[in-house]
C-alpha cells in the first residue's frame, strides 16, 4: 500500500517574532497612542493610572542630552528628524527589568521616510568616567540612565523614548489586520506595558508623522558596529556613529 505523505501547514493562529515586524508593531503602537488621546480628556484619571506617559525621569534624561556633532567630511541633513529610542524589556514594572532589545526609530518628516536600527545590547556606552555596556547599564540604573550614554555612543539626539515589555509585541501582533475598534478595546491593556516621556500631544504629533510616512516606507537594519576587547576576556560592540548616521539619513557627505 502506498502512503501519501502528509502535507505540512503553518499555523496562522500562532504568531512568531520576526525582527522585520517591528516597523509595523511600532506603527500600531502609535495608533494606540491616538486611541488614548481620544479618550484622555474624559477619562484622564482612569487612563493615567495603568499607563506611564509623561514619565519625569525619562523626560529629564531626554532634556539633558548634549547636541550631536558633525564628523569630518560629513554634515547634518537639513531634513527634519524625530529619533525615538525603543527599549524592549521583560517587565516594565519590575524592580530590575531585563533589557531584551534596543532600537532607534528615525522618522524623516521632510522626505517622508523612516528607519529602525537595531542596537546590540553589548554596545559600549559611557557611565560617567567608566565604560560599560547598554545591557549592564540598564540592569544597574534603569532606562533613564541609558538615554544620554546611547545618544553619545550614536552621536544622535533622542527626541523621545519608549520602554515596552516584550509581550506587548505579541499583543500588538494580535491586532494586525483588525479594525480600529479592536485597537481601541486593547489600548488600555497594551499601554499598561509601556513607559514613555511623551505627553498626549507628543503622541498625537508622532502618530500624524507616522501616518504621513506610511508603514510600507519603514526600513529595518542592524546598526553598523565594530568589535573590541572588553578587558575581561570577551568582546563588546562599538557603534560606528558615522555609518549609523548615514544609514539613518541624518548625515550626508559634505559638499
Image: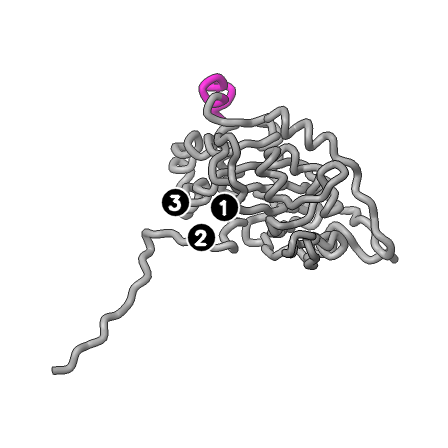
Does residue 144 appear to the left or right of 245 in the view shown? Answer: left
Please give the residue where the numbered disc 1 appears in the rendered image: 25
Which image quarter holds the N terminus?
Answer: bottom left
Does residue 185 appear to the left or right of 195 in the view shown? Answer: left
Residue at 70 percent across and 57 percent down: it is: 228
Q: Position of residue 191 (x, y in %)?
A: 47, 32
Magenta stretch secondary structure, dominant: helix
Q: Position of residue 56 (x, y in %)?
A: 63, 24
Tell me which label, 1 or 2, sits earlier in the chain: 2
Residue sitting nearer the eye, 91 or 216: 91
Please give the residue where the numbered disc 2 appears in the rendered image: 17
Residue at 49 percent across and 52 percent down: it is: 21
Residue sitting nearer the eye, 156 or 42: 156
Tell me which label, 1 or 3, sits earlier in the chain: 1
- Which mark is drawn over residue 174? 3
Q: Is 39 contained in the magenta span?
A: yes
Residue at 79 percent across and 38 percent down: it is: 67
Badge nearest the viewer, 2 or 3: 2
Residue range highlighted in magenta: 38-48
Amino acid at each position: 500500500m502506498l502512503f501519501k505523505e502528509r502535507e505540512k501547514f503553518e499555523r496562522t493562529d500562532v504568531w512568531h517574532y520576526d525582527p522585520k515586524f517591528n516597523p509595523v508593531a511600532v506603527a500600531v503602537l502609535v495608533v494606540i497612542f491616538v486611541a488614548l488621546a481620544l479618550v484622555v480628556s474624559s477619562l484622564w484619571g482612569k487612563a493615567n493610572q495603568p499607563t506611564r506617559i509623561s514619565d519625569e525621569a525619562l523626560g529629564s534624561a531626554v532634556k539633558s542630552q548634549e547636541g550631536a556633532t558633525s564628523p569630518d567630511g560629513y554634515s547634518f541633513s537639513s531634513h527634519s528628524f524625530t529619533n525615538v529610542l525603543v527599549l524592549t524589556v521583560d517587565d516594565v514594572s519590575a524592580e530590575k527589568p531585563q533589557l531584551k532589545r534596543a532600537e532607534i526609530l528615525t522618522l524623516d518628516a521632510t522626505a517622508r521616510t523612516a528607519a529602525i536600527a537595531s542596537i546590540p545590547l553589548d554596545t559600549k556606552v559611557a557611565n560617567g568616567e567608566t565604560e560599560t555596556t547598554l545591557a549592564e547599564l540598564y540592569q544597574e540604573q534603569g532606562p533613564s540612565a541609558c538615554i544620554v550614554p546611547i545618544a553619545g555612543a550614536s552621536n544622535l539626539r533622542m527626541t523621545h523614548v519608549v520602554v515596552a515589555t516584550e509581550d506587548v509585541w505579541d499583543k500588538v501582533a494580535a491586532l494586525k489586520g483588525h479594525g480600529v475598534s479592536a485597537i481601541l478595546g486593547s489600548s488600555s491593556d497594551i499601554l499598561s506595558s509601556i513607559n514613555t516621556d511623551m505627553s498626549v500631544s507628543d503622541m498625537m504629533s508622532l502618530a500624524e508623522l507616522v501616518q504621513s510616512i506610511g508603514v510600507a516606507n519603514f526600513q529595518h537594519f542592524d546598526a553598523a558596529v565594530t568589535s573590541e576587547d572588553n578587558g575581561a576576556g570577551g568582546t563588546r560592540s562599538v557603534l560606528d556613529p558615522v555609518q549609523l548616521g548615514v544609514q539613518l539619513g541624518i548625515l550626508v557627505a559634505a559638499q
